[in-house]
Amino acid sequence: MRQLTEGLYVSGQIGPDDLQNLAAQGVRSIICNRPDGEQFGQPDADQMAEAASALGLQFRAIPLIMGQLSPAHIEQTAAALAEIPGPVLAYCGSGMRSTMLWALAQAQAPAGPGKLSGDEIIAAAADAGFDISGLRHLLDGA
């Protein structure tokens, strides 16, 4: 689990058995950015949602196939982060897609407390081990 901001973490694939430990660490919501069936044997979003619900965790599925990013993905991510209780763990195959979606949602957020600049977004991702400098043209003006 890698921290992007206070209250937002990203990771690679997790499974239902990981949720109890995450809840014990204070995570209150899960966002799945991995499409069902991307890798053999991965739990599907319905399994994860059921396991999360059993532990009182919120769950949102916003699956993203690399190369198929749309404005809807960014809007859904922004809405989820605004609506669900934190701390939040977003996961995908490696954490990169979750980081990219957070970065793009953050860049489009309205000005106000907690709004990060493009440089701050890139730095937060880098601190978590993700190089999103290729998104700078989409983050500038954030």
Image (spheres, rainbow, N blue to C red):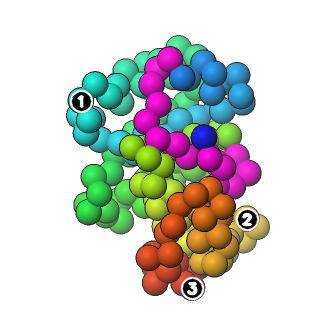
Which one is closest to the eye, mark 1 or mark 3? 1
Judged from the image, the secondary structure of the residue bearing numbered disc 1 is loop
Q: Nearer the viewer, residue 53 or 33?
A: 33
Which one is closest to the eye, mark 1 or mark 2? 1
Report the residue at 73% width, 51% height from top: 6
90 left or right, relative to 1: left
Residue under pointer 3 = 141
| Residue 107 spot, x, y in % from top left | 55, 72
At label 1, the amino acid type is Phe
Q: Residues within 10 Å of mark 1 (few under 14, many from 20)?
A: few
At label 2, the amino acid type is Gly
Disc marking residue 121: none
Let me know if residue 9 is in the magenta part.
yes
Residue under pointer 1 = 40
Q: Is residue 19 above or below residue 103?
A: above
Q: Residues within 10 Å of mark 2 (few under 14, many from 20)?
A: few
Q: Earlier in the sequence, mark 2 or mark 3?
A: 2
Asked if disc 2 and disc 3 are in contact, CB closer than 8 Å, the reply is no
Report the residue at 48% width, 49% height from top: 95
Separation of residues labelled 1 and 2 (CA atoms)? 39 Å
Report the residue at 73% width, 65% height from top: 114
Q: Image quadrant for the C terminus?
A: bottom right
Q: Is residue 14 above or below residue 1?
A: above
Residue under pointer 2 = 114
Judged from the image, the secondary structure of the residue bearing numbered disc 3 is loop
Query: Which picture quadrant has residue 126?
Result: bottom right
Report the residue at 66% width, 49% height from top: 3
100 left or right, relative to 120: left
> What segment carries the magenta color?
2-17
Let me know if residue 36 is in the magenta part.
no
Q: Does the rendering let one see residue 109?
A: no
| Residue 141 spot, x, y in % from top left | 57, 85
